[in-house]
Amino acid sequence: MTRRAESRCIRPAELRDLDRVAALWTAITHHHSALDPIFTMRPDADAALRDLLEAMQRDPETLILVYDDDDDLPGMAIARIDQQPPIMQETQRAEITDLGVREGERRRGIASALVDAALEWIRVSGVDRVEVNVARGNREGQAFWRARGFGDLMDVLQLRL
C-alpha cells in the first residue's frame, strides 16, 4: 500500500495523523461551503470530526489515506466499501467519500496518486464499482473525476422546506 518516491509516500493514516487529516477535511469543507451553504460546518464540529475520523480508522471497510511528504501531509483521501441491499445483483460498491489537497500543493499529482492508491485498495477488496459525489458547482472537481473516467449515474434532487 505504501508508495515511495524520494521521501514522499501514500500510506494509511495513523492515529497521530488524525488532527492533520481533520484540518485537511475542514479546509475541503470550507472550499465547498463557498460553492453552497449546505456544506457549512458547525462552529463546534472539531471534536465530532476527530471522533468520526477515529471511528473510520477502526472500521475495516474504510480507509483513510494520506500523502506523506517528509512528514508533511498535504493531501488525504477517504474510501469505504458499502454493502448493497440483499435484493441487488451487485452486493458491494465502494465510494471515495473525500479527497483533498491543501491549497498551494495542488496540480502536483497528489490527488491522482491518492485516488490510484484508493482504487487499488478497492480492487484488492474485490469491489468493482466506485462512486464519488461531486458538487455540481465544483467545476475543478467535476473535471478531475471525469478525466479519470467517472461518469454520471444519478442526479440528486433537493427541496428546502
Image (cartoon, rainbow, N blue to C red):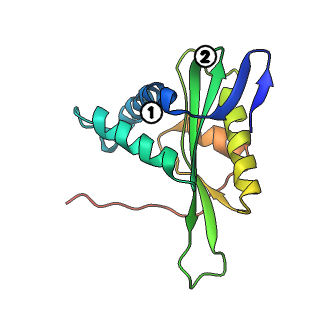
Q: Is residue 36 visible?
A: no
From the viewer's perspective, is the residue at label 1 or at label 2 nearer? 2
The Cα–Cα distance between marks 1 and 2, rounded to whole angstroms, is 18 Å
Relative image position of residue 83 (x, y in whole percent): 56, 69
Please, is residue 18 above or below residue 1 in the view?
Answer: above
Can residue 81 be seen here? The reply is yes
- The amino acid at mark 2 is Asp
Q: Residue 22: x percent and y percent?
A: 42, 31
**Which residue is rendered at x = 68% and y = 44% of the image?**
118
In depth, the one of 25 and 5 nearer the eye is 5
Question: Image quadrant of residue 156?
Answer: bottom left
Q: Residues within 10 Å of mark 2 (few under 14, many from 20)?
A: few
State the residue at coordinates (79%, 15%): 6
The residue type indicated by label 1 comes to Trp
Task: Classify the position of the C terminus by image quarter.
Answer: bottom left
Q: Is residue 13 left or right of residue 9?
A: left
Image coordinates of residue 133 in percent, x first then y, are 52, 51
| Mark 1 burial class by Cα count in 10 Å: few <14, some 14-19, many 20+ | many
Nearer-N-terminus badge (1/2): 1
Q: Residue furthest right?
A: 5
Q: Residue at x 72, y 20 (%)?
A: 8
Which residue is tagged 1? 25
Q: Which mark is residue 72?
A: none
